[in-house]
Image (cartoon, rainbow, N blue to C red):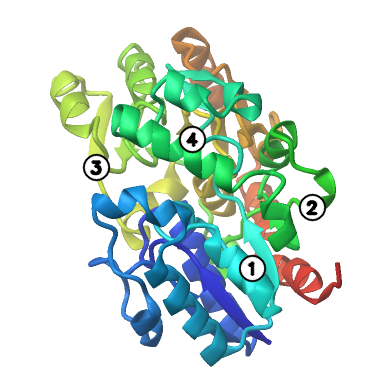
């Protein structure tokens, strides 16, 4: 089968990019021909398909490309004609590439599926969050993004977000997409609330490349006397709240990741012996730390979709303490593979951290169940049924 993968970036920038790179590897391992389409960006991995990539988006292009500019149209059309895909699998394409490519792929005659890594289909600013709280106002009134100036760039950015949402709406996009593939039921329900038909959705949880995992026999039966955070050090990830809680406990927290809050938090807690900031690390560097951690904490204060960090931790036999928000609770079996706490609540977080240290978890069983649930092989079988089915 010939499969064309599209995502705005082509390097390990975030969960959407990691997913697409892993999917490319998986599909090739099963003998499929795979092409990629992305924006020409300095950090991109090298690929023979880069000649088809539209150039990096300038500030001026931010006012035109979300609606589908001439370069995106011509280069993507050329790629369709040259590669002749059976399936076009979209990922994060808004703004830098635009949903125009869904329309072009559909008109070409390819099957079109779209993995949803965020709530952009129903929220112009991707998150359904405003002033730190869940917001559904744009579900019924797209002008709310202008009224509240939710987009970067204040009024100009908000106007572009409004016009983009009006152009690529719940009445238009389903005409060009055979199936939307949200990795969580939460994301599907969010889109349905925003006006999409549930018949156009199939929940397909993210996967992990099990070849990158150490053997289950190497899972430590006795974990280290610390817990870990893995992810972007930002307000949305709740790291400020986490550090407030950690500073009040006599338990070591290792924070793995970079982000805009890192310099501030390192300075604030420079004399706190319970918090260690590791900064940005690659898989080979943080994997042993995560595997030996008593548990991982995901302190998000935004409604995450299907966070890969939870899947990675559990696949290493490490239980997860996750914020009870978005799709996170779908990944955690209370008391078996972890626990949940009230997002943004320092006191509840402190209480659950202590309970996680006291609770007995079967680390080997956590790893086995996670690998069975999230393995690339299981994912591939489900994805092939979707690719091959007629709609």
Q: Which mark is residue 376?
A: 1
| Mark 3 touches mark 2? (CB < 8 Å) | no
Instruction: Compute the Cα span from label 2 to label 1.
Output: 24 Å
For this orientation, the residue located farthest to the top is 347
Give how far across and how far down residue 5 sits, in percent.
54, 72
Residue 359 appears in the figure? no
Disc 3 or 2, which lies upstream in sequence?
2
- Which one is nearer the viewer's eye here, 312 or 26? 26
Quadrant assignment for the N terminus: bottom right
Q: Quadrant of residue 336?
A: top right
Instruction: Compute the Cα span from label 1 to label 3.
Output: 29 Å
Q: Is residue 2 left or right of residue 261?
A: right
Disc 4 or 3, which lies upstream in sequence?
4
| Mark 1 touches mark 3? (CB < 8 Å) | no
Secondary structure of the residue carrying tag 2 is helix
From the image, state whether disc 4 or disc 3 is nearer to you: 4
Give the class, few, some or many, for how many residues have Cα within 10 Å of label 2's Cα (few <14, many ≥20). Answer: some
Give the class, few, some or many, for how many residues have Cα within 10 Å of label 1's Cα (few <14, many ≥20). Answer: many
| Mark 2 touches mark 4? (CB < 8 Å) | no
- Which one is nearer the viewer's eye here, 244 or 290? 244
Give how far across and how far down residue 341 sits, in percent.
57, 20
From the image, state whether disc 3 or disc 2 is nearer to you: 2
Give how far across and how far down residue 61 sits, in percent.
30, 55
Q: Which mark is residue 200?
A: 2
**For mark 3, what is the residue?**
278
**For mark 4, what is the residue?**
162
Q: Which mark is residue 290?
A: none
């Amino acid at each position: 089968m010939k499969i064309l993968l599209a995502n705005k970036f082509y390097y390990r920038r975030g969960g959407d990019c990691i997913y697409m790179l892993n999917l490319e590897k998986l599909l090739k391992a099963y003998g499929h021909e795979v092409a990629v389409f992305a924006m020409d960006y300095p950090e991109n991995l090298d690929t023979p398909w880069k000649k088809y990539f539209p150039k990096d988006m300038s500030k001026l292009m931010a006012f035109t490309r979300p609606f589908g500019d001439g370069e995106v149209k011509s280069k993507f059309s050329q790629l369709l004609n040259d590669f002749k895909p059976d399936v076009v699998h979209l990922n994060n394409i808004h703004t830098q590439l635009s949903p125009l490519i869904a329309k072009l792929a559909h008109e070409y005659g390819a099957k079109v599926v779209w993995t949803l890594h965020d709530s952009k289909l129903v929220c112009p600013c991707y998150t359904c969050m405003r002033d730190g709280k869940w917001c559904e106002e744009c579900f019924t009134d797209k002008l709310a993004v202008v009224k509240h100036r939710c987009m970067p760039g204040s009024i100009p950015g908000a106007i572009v977000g409004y016009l983009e949402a009006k152009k690529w709406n719940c009445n238009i996009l389903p005409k060009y997409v055979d199936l939307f593939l949200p990795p969580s039921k939460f994301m599907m329900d969010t889109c349905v609330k925003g006006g999409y038909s549930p018949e156009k959705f199939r929940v397909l949880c993210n996967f992990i490349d099990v070849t990158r995992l150490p053997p289950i026999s190497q899972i430590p039966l006795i974990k280290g006397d610390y817990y870990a955070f893995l992810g972007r050090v930002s307000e949305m990830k709740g790291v400020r709240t986490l550090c407030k809680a950690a500073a009040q406990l006599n338990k070591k927290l290792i924070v793995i990741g970079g982000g805009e809050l890192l310099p501030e938090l390192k300075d604030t807690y420079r004399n706190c012996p319970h918090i260690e900031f590791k900064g940005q690390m690659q898989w080979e560097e943080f994997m042993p730390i995560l595997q030996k951690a008593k548990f991982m904490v995901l302190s998000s204060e935004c409604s995450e979709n299907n966070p890969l960090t939870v899947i990675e931790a559990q696949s290493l036999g490490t239980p997860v303490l996750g914020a009870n928000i978005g799709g996170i609770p779908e990944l955690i079996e209370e008391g078996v593979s972890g626990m949940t706490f009230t997002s943004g609540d320092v006191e509840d977080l402190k209480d659950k951290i202590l309970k996680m240290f006291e609770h007995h978890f079967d680390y080997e069983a956590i790893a086995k169940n996670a690998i069975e649930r999230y393995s690339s092989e299981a994912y591939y079988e489900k994805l092939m049924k979707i690719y091959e089915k007629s709609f």
